[in-house]
Amino acid sequence: METVKNLEISLKSKKYKIFLGNNLLNQIDFILKNHLTNKNIVILYDKVLKDRLNILELSLSKVASKIASIEISSGEKSKSLNNYIKLCEQVIKTGISRDTIIVAFGGGVIGDLVGFVSSTLLRGLNFIQIPSTLLSQVDSSIGGKTGINSVYGKNLIGTFYQPIAVLTDVSLLQTLNKREILSGYAEIVKHSIIKDKVFFQWLEKNGPDIIMGNNQLRIEAILKSCRIKRSVVEEDEFEKGNRALLNLGHTFGHAIEGYLNYDGTILHGEAVSIGIIMAIKLSLKMGYCSKNDYERILKHFNDVGLPTSMKLYTSKIIDPLKLWKIMQNDKKMYKNHLNFILPDKIGKCTIRKDIKKSEVLSLLNEELRT
Ligand SMILES: NC(=O)c1ccc[n+]([C@@H]2O[C@H](COP(=O)([O-])OP(=O)(O)OC[C@H]3O[C@@H](n4cnc5c(N)ncnc54)[C@H](O)[C@@H]3O)[C@@H](O)[C@H]2O)c1
Ligand SMILES: [Zn+2]
């Protein structure tokens, strides 16, 4: 029996646990017995996990009364309105009732999409997340944001809807490529810069081994990271205030993804990585953080191989004004202000609402034209 760590998430809308460890998939019947016994279960899974579906089904079959599985194509395109409708109909066709449990088995795309399906079917079915990418294990599976994309932008249609449990199995990461691992790692470092200097120091020491595949260190990093996200989300479940701190690097990051048309040229975590560097450069420019902290963050990003410049992703000249315009269309615009989450130092960030267009444009010009 593998050791299972757990972390309780205690929110106004729901209390639930994240179960975390190595090789947990074939023990789900035991770990989540209370939730699954005699239940009708519908698994919605990323096609890429097809070879591991039978392990999950076998384990579930020891306790469940009925299991159906529905495959979803890999990739962001699956988070569309058309696909959402198709999936709802497919799930309904399996024969569901109010106590059916939906299982989301995949990365952030599956978690967001299936979470949204679960939150709307029969006015809300219980769902369990089994995140299979590092990014989803440290970020998207916690906090209850679900959603799909509109033709006008990403994640514009969605709900806040918490799962009843999360099963995080690091053995699933064995098949994930290094780019995807780094993309998830960017969100881990993000959490440390937002709230925990000691964790950042720990990452400076252990980052390379986490990326290389040390499972014990991965478990520790995920746990530490989830604790930080938990503390922010528990304080502000519906993002009325400080939850926005989790968007460090995302104002720039989303604009970079948008500029590159969300066509897969750049991964979300890569854009966030570059966005964090831009945020700290802006912070340095404004006099909010020290050169020493900026250099320390930059060094860590270089040491582990996180990208620090958008220029790596296009051979064309990048237009700063176009990037700025995309930023303004971000749904995080509030009362005509662009919010920037800027580090004051490693372990502390502030939501800044007073950054002038000229400051941002001058930074983008320095960044992109040289
Ligand atoms: N809800 C939230 O709070 C939140 C937070 C951050 C990101 N997100 C969303 O998450 C999505 C990005 O998440 P992601 O990076 O996990 O994307 P993803 O789900 O597309 O997974 C990335 C790639 O890895 C593949 N994959 C998944 N598991 C694998 C495994 N075990 N082995 C090999 N390949 C595997 C997928 O098929 C895909 O090609 C975006 O849609 C983003 O909007 C949501
Ligand atoms: Zn993110």
Image (cartoon, rainbow, N blue to C red):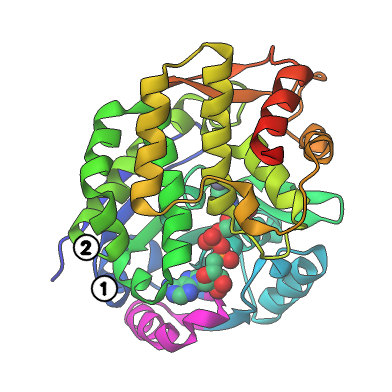
Can you give x and y, in whole percent of width and height, for residue 296 in the image? 35, 31
Q: In the image shown, does 355 or 5 lie closer to the viewer?
A: 355
Tell whether label 1 touches label 2 (CB within 8 Å).
no
Q: How far across and down, in percent of the image, does residue 328 sit?
A: 81, 32
Asked whether, in this view, residue 69 is left or right of residue 124, the answer is: left
| Residue corresponding to mark 1 | 27
In the picture, the quarter occupied by the C terminus is top right
Query: Which image quadrant shows ligand 1?
Result: bottom right
Q: Secondary structure at mark 2?
A: loop
Q: Which one is in front, 53 or 295?
A: 295
Q: Is residue 50 magenta?
A: yes
Asked whether 67 or 256 is in front, the reply is 256
Task: Single out the mark in the foreground, 2 or 1.
Answer: 2
SS label for mark 1: helix
**Residue 26 point in image, percent of width and height:** 29, 78
- Figure quadrant of residue 151: bottom right
Label 1 packing within 10 angstroms: few (<14), some (14-19), many (20+)? some
Q: Quadrant of the N terminus?
A: bottom left
Mark 1, ligand 1, within 8 Å: the answer is no
Which quadrant would residue 112 be assigned to in this image?
A: bottom right
Image coords of residue 150 (percent x, y): 82, 54
Disc number placed over residue 193 in the picture, else none: none
Determine which residue is flagged by label 2.
214
Give the amino acid type for the residue marked by disc 2 in the picture: Asn
For image coordinates 61% across by 38% down, the residue present is: 250
The answer to if 54 sits in the magenta stretch is yes
Residue found at x 58% / y 13% = 286
Instruction: Give above or below for 345 relative to 243.
Output: above
The magenta span reads 42-67
